[in-house]
Image: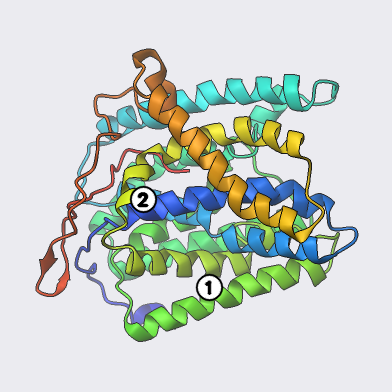
């Protein structure tokens, strides 16, 4: 605990949150790329040829995206300046998370039963829901639902707890999550379910707030890039050459050591590099939740028609071109869907506010040479990220 003793007790001065908008836009494309390549990584391993190593590299390089989404959610929800009463906060989150969770769970249970696994009588949708992961991406909503219930209590930590206590709490939760994933994946001990799936990710949620206002120095930027590159390389090599079944799935897990380091580094680097500009990404980010919800419905049928790639150029198409195509299609559908009153709610837009209004794209103000304490491009704290 000695390093924690060197951490001050006061929170850092607030910085602009404008960078979170383009960060979420980039991260959702990375999430789609993970799902686009997942089957390729699993099924092309046997020959362990160049095509698999390329797919492994892109998959490993995108793994930071989900933890960064979780950290951004925590950075906004745990901000003591929000000041929402627990009842008001939870009521708004029912609109943002609860309704989409129920609706899209039903959609993807039907999609899996009647499209992906029409002849698999052994798959039980009720048990799939009880795992808290009824489809490939929906576990994120179940995680957010659990964290939402605890957010009013976690916010007490950001309001009344010292910065040292916040760091300690976040690191302890992160350590518990990493140990839980190691035990469950490597030793097949225990398994997350609908009641506990949120717990391993709580460390990212808290550390998102703790790291939100950290401004990297020039030396810090270099070190963060080295940490990101080194951790991605470790994941690539560990997945292909490590012990266990091939490919070894554990290095890809969001709480494996390599992905944790990459996620923390990516979070800080996105803050540093994306604090102003990026007009197109600011325009796109409100549709990221719709892309998250819709993309498997587009991805699986198109990929089935195309077939899995067996060459390096084919892998590059699925790693770069197709995720962009899937993202654009889903963004357009979302843009149209949120204009329909009866459909808005299932995209998290049923509440009193419309976070899809066009953001103000002026660069953040500067105060005494530092980023403004309030951003002109403030993300909506109640908009769910993937």
Q: Residues within 10 Å of mark 1 (few under 14, many from 20)?
A: many
Q: Nearer the viewer, residue 242 or 305?
A: 305
> Does residue 255 lie above or below 141 as drawn?
below
**Which of the 4 image quarters holds residue 18?**
bottom left
> Does residue 263 lie above or below 76 as drawn?
below
Q: Is residue 204 left or right of residue 20?
A: right
Circle 2 residue: 281
Whether residue 242 can be seen here: no
Quote the CA–CA distance across marks 1 and 2.
22 Å
Q: Residue 191: x and y, percent?
A: 70, 45
Whether residue 272 can be seen here: yes
Q: Residue 119: x and y, percent?
A: 85, 21
Circle 1 residue: 228
Task: Please count the marks in the image.
Answer: 2
- Which residue sits at x=26%, y=52%? 79
Q: Is residue 116 left or right of residue 347?
A: right
Q: Residue 152: x and y, percent?
A: 32, 43
Q: Quadrant of the N terminus?
A: bottom left
Q: Residue 330: x and y, percent?
A: 50, 34
- Which residue sits at x=48%, y=77%? 225
Helix, strand or loop for disc 2: helix
Helix, strand or loop for disc 1: helix
> Does residue 267 lie above or below 66 as drawn?
below
Q: Nearer the viewer, residue 269 or 170?
A: 269
Q: Nearer the viewer, mark 1 or mark 2?
A: 2
């Amino acid at each position: 605990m000695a390093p924690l003793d060197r951490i001050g007790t006061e929170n850092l001065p607030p910085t602009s949150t404008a960078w979170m908008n383009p960060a979420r836009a980039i991260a959702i494309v990375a999430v789609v790329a993970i799902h686009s390549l997942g089957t390729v990584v699993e099924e092309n391993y046997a020959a362990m040829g160049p095509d698999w190593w390329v797919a492994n590299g892109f998959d490993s390089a995108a793994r930071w995206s989900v933890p960064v989404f979780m950290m951004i959610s925590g950075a906004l929800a745990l901000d003591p300046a929000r000041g929402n009463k627990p009842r008001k906060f939870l009521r708004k989150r029912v609109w943002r998370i609860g309704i989409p969770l129920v609706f899209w769970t039903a959609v993807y249970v039907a999609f899996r039963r009647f499209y992906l696994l029409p002849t698999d009588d052994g798959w039980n949708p009720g048990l799939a829901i009880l795992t808290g992961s009824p489809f490939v991406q929906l576990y994120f909503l179940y995680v957010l639902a659990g964290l939402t219930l605890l957010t009013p209590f976690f916010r007490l930590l950001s309001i009344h707890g010292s910065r040292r206590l916040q760091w300690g709490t976040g690191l302890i939760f992160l350590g518990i999550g990493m140990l839980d994933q190691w035990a469950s994946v490597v030793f097949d001990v225990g398994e997350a379910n609908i009641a506990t799936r949120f717990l391993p990710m709580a460390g990212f949620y808290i550390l998102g707030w703790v790291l939100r206002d950290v401004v990297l120095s020039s030396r810090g930027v270099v070190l963060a890039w080295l940490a990101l590159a080194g951790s991605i390389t470790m994941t690539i090599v560990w997945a292909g050459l490590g012990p266990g079944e091939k490919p070894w799935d554990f290095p890809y897990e969001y709480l494996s050591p390599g992905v944790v380091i990459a996620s923390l580094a990516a979070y800080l680097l996105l803050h540093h590099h994306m604090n102003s500009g990026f007009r197109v990404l600011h325009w796109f980010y409100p549709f990221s939740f719709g892309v998250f919800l819709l993309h498997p419905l587009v991805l699986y049928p198109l990929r089935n028609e195309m077939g899995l790639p067996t060459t390096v150029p084919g892998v590059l198409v699925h790693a770069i071109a197709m995720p962009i195509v899937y993202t654009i299609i889903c963004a357009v559908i979302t843009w149209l869907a949120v204009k329909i009153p009866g459909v808005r709610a299932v995209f998290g837009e049923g509440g009193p506010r419309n976070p899809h209004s066009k953001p103000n794209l002026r660069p953040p103000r500067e105060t005494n040479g530092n980023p403004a304490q309030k951003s002109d491009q403030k993300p909506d704290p109640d908009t769910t990220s993937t």
